Image (spheres, rainbow, N blue to C red):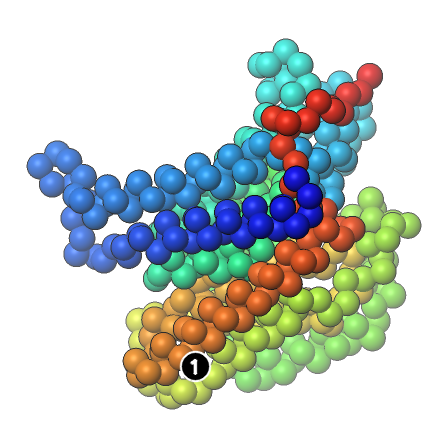
Amino acid sequence: MGRFGSILFYLFLAAVTCMMAWQIRQPSVEDVLWTGGQRTRKSFRNRLFITGIFVVLFLAAALRFDIGNDYRQYTQTAHEAYVGGYVVTEAGFNGLVRLLYWMTGGEYYELVFAVFAFVTLYFFLKAFVRQSVDFSQTFFLFMTFGLYFQTYNTVRYYLALAIALYAMKYVLEKDYIRFVFWIFAAALFHKSVLLVIPVYWICTFAWKGWHIIAGLLASAACYLGKGVILRLALVVYPSYRNTVYLEGSGISASTLRILAVLCLYLWFVTYTGAGIREKVWYRELRFYGQLNLLAFVASTAFSFLPVVTRIAYYFGVSQLFLIPLVIRHIEDGRIRRRVAWIVFGVCIIYFLVFLLMAHKDGVGLLPYKSWLFESQRYTYK
């Protein structure tokens, strides 16, 4: 499948799953899931469409071959983990690879990618169902922001990201035992996720103006002293030493997206007025807003750090919940529809730009290939 055909395939994939998501009816507190020992029509319909979405996205991810900037590297890392060679990957990944290779009696890395795709999608969709005020809007953002397609890259990281998103609910509910449990489980596959334990907790508190000003000044100081900060970062992640990642990520499209979402959040808070602090959903909104502020700071003041986007994504992924929450609570129907259409248009443009650039080095999502139609395999001795 060529580059243009692959773009059409990704567009089709997004369109079909978004249409299915649009059919899902948001459950309310009063909804009854079971009656007379059977699921209600609404509950059954929702579950059917969610399952359909999962199957379509899982198959596309599980059947891919050599898609992503590190697909081949992962096959080699899996081989080294299996034979007991030196690897920098975490114990969860190494143990899972050994288990799957032992069960199948061979180095079937396709199964490894399939398992990661299954678990990653499960946690993303589970988080959408139980935490978003509008599943269809959140899923639309998930697809058009390119997050689903980026799960084809760095599969360990995106599994950790999905679990971090899933665990947000626990920190908001002050269920810290479950929150820490899930983050430690995610850290078995990507240790960077441990950063969210203090950060998510800090973001549950109301920040005062001087807190924000002090934080911005400290971030500016870190940028000025980036040489020292970078050396400290390389102590934690020595594998990035003498690599292209040290060139920094600069201002990317995702950074501009974070800035746009921050502007939407600030507009909504100003538009709603002082009464917003009395709303039952304000604490959740503030949590997401403060996370996005940190995502913007990480993407700008700390842009010199290797692959800083991984840190920013732990914070910015909350956009999937923030935007629908804002749209839901715009009281003026005319303004609400206008904002929703603006968001829709911007997301479509963002998605098209993402697809047009998805062939570049560091992304590697085009062209799409499946191992069903490929005779080539990566083998190691």
Q: Residue at x 66, y 50 (%)?
A: 4
Q: Quadrant of residue 269?
A: bottom left
Q: Is residue 294 left or right of residue 301?
A: left
> Circle 1 is placed at which residue position?
268
Q: Give the position of the N terminus as an image quadrant.
A: top right
Residue 329, above or below 165: below
Q: Residue at x 61, y 51 (%)?
A: 7
Q: Quadrant of residue 29?
A: bottom left
378 or 225: which is nearer to us? 378
371 or 217: which is nearer to us? 371
315 or 121: which is nearer to us? 121
110 or 315: which is nearer to us? 110
Q: Is residue 281 left or right of residue 164?
A: left
For the image, the number of numbered tags is: 1
Q: Give the position of the C terminus as an image quadrant.
A: top right
Q: Quadrant of residue 83?
A: top right
Residue, far right: 242
Residue 102, above or below 370: above
Question: Can residue 254 be seen in the rendering of this structure?
Answer: yes
Q: Residue at x 50, y 81 (%)?
A: 266
Crowding near the residue tagged with mark 1, few <14, some 14–19, many ≥20 C-alpha atoms within 10 Å: some
Q: Position of residue 135 (x, y in %)?
A: 37, 56
Q: Position of residue 338 (x, y in %)?
A: 40, 79
| Element marked by disc 1 | helix
Q: Position of residue 164 (x, y in %)?
A: 52, 50
Q: Inspect the image, locate mark 1, and give the three-letter code of the amino acid beneath it.
A: Phe
Residue, far left: 36
Q: Position of residue 238 (x, y in %)?
A: 83, 46
Q: Is residue 181 left or right of residue 75?
A: left
Q: Is residue 326 left or right of residue 103?
A: left
Question: Can residue 180 be seen in the rendering of this structure?
Answer: no
